[in-house]
Amino acid sequence: MTEAATIRCQFQVPFGFDVLFTERVFSRANPLLRRLLLTGQRNAREKLLVVVEQPIVALMPGLPEEIRAYFAASPDVELVAAPVELPGGELLKNHYASIEQLHARIEQHHLSRHSYVAAIGGGALLDVVGFAAATAHRGIRHIRFPTTTLSQADGGVGVKNAINAFGKKNFVGTFTPPFAVINDSEFLRFLPDTRKSAGYIEAVKVGLIRDAGFFSEIETMADALNRFEPAAMHRLIHRSAELHVQHICRGGDPFEFGAARPLDFGHWAAHKLEQLSAFRITHSEAVAIGIALDVIYSRNAGYLSPADAERILALIRKLRFALFGPELLRGDAESERALLGGLEEFREHLGGELTITLLEGVGRGFEVHEISPEGVLRAIKELRERDQPLAEHE
Ligand SMILES: NC(=O)c1ccc[n+]([C@@H]2O[C@H](COP(=O)([O-])OP(=O)(O)OC[C@H]3O[C@@H](n4cnc5c(N)ncnc54)[C@H](O)[C@@H]3O)[C@@H](O)[C@H]2O)c1
Ligand SMILES: [Zn+2]
């Protein structure tokens, strides 16, 4: 074949979306959503399907009627049906049936590529609805309303969606930027306390790798955050979401073609720990331990000063996260192998070279391509010592 036989096609598509902050987005007096929908308006009246998490409707029984009344008063958008209610949480991601159900609704109501599919729920429901919206007609405009601290500060503001398959997390999914994300603080009021603080640790993580000033701010706000004061929670969510979104839109690799995943700092051990504990340890609890592990490892390897390491571990503790889980170190060779296997799984997930983010200071992450298994075990042993409940010392 000669070179002349090649037809080359190259193009760029401009992507962009806003993350908007508000309170009580469906209150009739709140114009934010109506204005947003006008920005996507053509001549026709666009259709909108809303999907909402059942547990949220149980806590806010007036919500479906509020949504209906909001759109009844908006001439530009047609709400095609009462909000579709789905159970939330990780289980929803394990079955394809919910995708099929959503595709059937989209077909039944004759939504087009210019219509909207809105999702109100935690990160799991957003992933499911986002995937259904991205695949019906090869992509329908999708508006996200994350309802957990974690999804407002981290998972819900990005460009990914997925469901789990073949026992693997996020195995089937797409990179599809949403039409918009709306962070409504009202939803957070109904979260149980542990879920309220779940998002804190991802904010600590992104501060640690990107923004020392933000890390200091979280230190200053820690008491207010522990009391779940709305102003402190709002500030934490806003800056964390901003840093996550900046990484996507300015980091040069929004669809993750490369191997580096700096926002996954602390996550290689966290993913494994969630799995080893059969998900007794939640994602945020596991991330807190994973960060502590990589902090000690960074200090022992001479990258991070002992003072910085102490400062970071103190904040994690102050925000009431444990530094150790017994599943990390059962003391036998097999469990050691299982944990270290997490490094290999992480490499596989990245699709090539192992790339782990470590710290050389607060706000300064950097990448390494090799991790010493002995160093990891040493760090884990130190975490176990530090986390020892007082009674066991006595
Ligand atoms: N797409 C991405 O880029 C991305 C990034 C990070 C995480 N994620 C995904 O996000 C999921 C985790 O999200 P999550 O932490 O939001 O958990 P979640 O979606 O599993 O929700 C946790 C629980 O909180 C309940 N809930 C949600 N909102 C509530 C509210 N306002 N009041 C009371 N209860 C409420 C849910 O019903 C559920 O039981 C995981 O599946 C993860 O893979 C996706
Ligand atoms: Zn995470």
Image: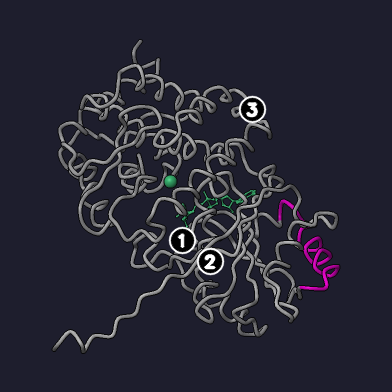
| Cβ atoms under marks 1 and 2 closer than 8 Å | yes
Quadrant showing the C terminus:
top left
**Is label 2 within 8 A of ligand 1 (CB to nearest ligand atom)?**
yes
Q: Percent x, y for residue 251? A: 40, 50
Q: Percent x, y for residue 294? A: 30, 33
Left or right relative to 89: residue 361: left
Number of the front mark, 2 or 3: 2
Residue, x 58% and y 41% (percent of image)?
A: 237
Query: Element at badge 3?
Result: loop
Residue, x 52% and y 41% (percent of image)?
A: 240
What distance separates the C-alpha of mark 1 from that of mark 2? 8 Å
Pointer 2: what residue?
Answer: 130
In terms of depth relative to the viewer, which is nearer, 327 or 316?
A: 316
In terms of depth relative to the viewer, which is nearer, 16 or 384?
A: 16
Q: Which residues are magenta?
A: 58-76
**Is label 3 within 8 A of ligand 1 (CB to nearest ligand atom)?**
no
Pointer 1: what residue?
Answer: 160
Query: Element at badge 1?
Result: strand
**Is label 1 within 8 A of ligand 1 (CB to nearest ligand atom)?**
yes
Q: Residues within 10 Å of mark 1 (few under 14, many from 20)?
A: many
Residue, x 68% and y 35% (percent of image)?
A: 230
Q: Amino acid at mark 2?
A: Gly
